[in-house]
Image (cartoon, coloured by chain):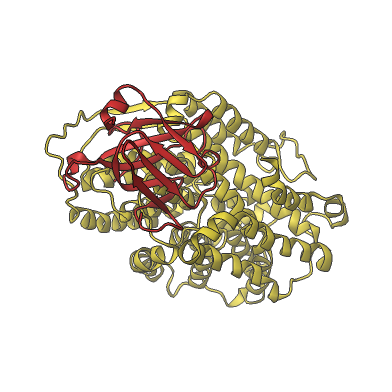
Amino acid sequence: MKTLDDVLKNNLNGLHYGNRILLPFRVDILKAVVEKEIIMDFSSTKSGASYKICDDYTEVYFYDYKNLSEVVSEFEKIKLVVVEVGKDLFDFANHRKLALHTEDKHKLTITEIKDDSLLFLE
Amino acid sequence: MMKKHIPQILLILFFLSPLNIFASGAEGSEHTLPNPIMVIPFAVLLLMIATGPLFYHHFWERNYPKIALALGSVTVIYYLVFLNDTHSLLHTLAEYISFIALLSSLFVASGGILIKVDKKSTPMLNVLILLFGAVISNIIGTTGASMLLIRPYIKVNKNRIKPYHIIFFIFAVSNIGGALDPIGDPPLFLGFLRGIGFFWFIEHIILVWAPTLIVLMAIFYVIDSRNKGEEVPDAQYSGKIEFKGGKNVIYLAIILLSVFIDPGILKWVPSLAPLPFGIREIIMFSVAYFSFKSADKKILEANEFDFEPIREVAYLFIGIFATMIPALQLIAYESKVYGQELSPGVFYWATGVLSAILDNAPTFLNFLSAALGKYGMDVNVKEQVFQFSLTYPIYVQAISIAAVFFGAMTYIGNGPNFMVKSICERAGIKMPSFFGYLMKYSIPILLPIFFVIWLIVFYGKV
């Protein structure tokens, strides 16, 4: 099982298939932004988004989109606020901001949003 | 990809059809007044813009282009088939192309500029940014200033941002700021084209503009001082302001200079009539293309540049421009009928209330026309408009202030309002709904200020 830091350090990718993304680490998701849609409710399985933490990865479904790669344009990112499983969710220091970009062949690039890079507020 | 744009292309073809261009009368020809029932598509569109994101969000997000185009088509077909009035349609199309050319070129060119302000967010710094934005909106337009400053403004406030930060930005930078010259806001530019002097506005509006901004900033300062935000104990600020994308400043300058490339201002500029655009629009679209193609990809990535905000404005406003034709013509007619009885105060409120929900440029022009008509003058005669602005400045002042200031009352009052909202939502900031904006911010904050302006400047004047 890889940690979030392993993935970021080694520039490992996730995957995307239609409206589903697979992150190669285990995280709780607190907030997601796709286009101008701000999602903070992950309880529904019909609208917004939901996620499932599996043994080695986390999978996220975005119900309002058929194909994420058609929605996220060249310079745009899907943005997430996540906390690694096992870390204290209530400590803001553990909240990490990620930018995901859909590439060809179902590749999903994962980068961390530092303070001075992308505009994304928790 | 092409399939997605078919309805838009069809609507434009309707506007451009040979039947349309050649069947109509000459410029300024009298047209039959529309049936008041034809205001319904406009009312429906406004209602859907207000309620869509609130009550049927997903349906609205997926279908707003189709809805705007369908409602716009109802008006277009009515004018073509029932009124045989192609002049109004062509005129509106020309205004729409001009509007979208300026907005899209400023949006694209400013998207290639990155400003980073590494300073601690304080109420005073925010006031200074907003005031700076208000001033430069008279140099690069309210759209240019909004696009240039919204991202650094959000970044400065990242640890304490609240919706009111953005709303006051829309109030000051995207609207009220740009009241001092014709570059600031489109209605004033229309006034300039019709004969009002370039510096008339600064001369006659600054004494209302400055106190309005001071009061607005004082309210903002009080609210912002109560927001302690999230303390970042180890945060260090260099105090530096970083600016990247210098060549796009040249593109911005070209766009702003091209505003004046109009046969009405410079006699040597050829008119492309009957085409519904001119050399100016060609320059603006070309600049948009080249500035995007030559932009630094890293800056575009940092700005998360995307065409969606301008696409949204383009679709919604093609519907708004088309459906509002009957409303504007009925207003123009009524204002001429009752023009004799209208005081500067009435012109102020009428222009203001309608500018909050209609496009403020034609609203401005209709009321200017009515005010001139009151004194037997014609809005189409430059010398008379110039003379009117000197002899009866109070009317032009009332109409100009109202057209620009009241644009801040709703998200649809002015083009940049919507674009700022869209950029903020992409940054993860939950913005108030159409009604939330109106009830929580513009009515309690702006309306009392606008009322005081009326009381001091226009009340009792004839």
Q: Position of residue A98 (x, y in %)?
A: 33, 36
Q: Nearer the viewer, residue B365 or A11?
A: A11
Q: Nearer the viewer, residue A93 or B202?
A: A93
* B62 relative to B374, above or below: above
Q: Is residue A74 visible?
A: yes
Q: Position of residue B397 (x, y in %)?
A: 49, 60
What residue is drawn where x is 37% and y is 48%? A51
What residue is drawn where x is 72% and y is 60%? B73
Residue at the far front: name it: A55
Q: Position of residue B149 (x, y in %)?
A: 38, 40
* Chain coloured red: A
* Chain coloured yellow: B
Instruction: Quadrant for the N terminus of chain B, please.
Output: top right
B231 relative to B68 in the view: left or right: left
Q: Position of residue B304 (x, y in %)?
A: 44, 36
What residue is drawn where x is 77% and y is 66%? B78
* B330 relative to A56, above or below: below
* B269 relative to B183, above or below: above
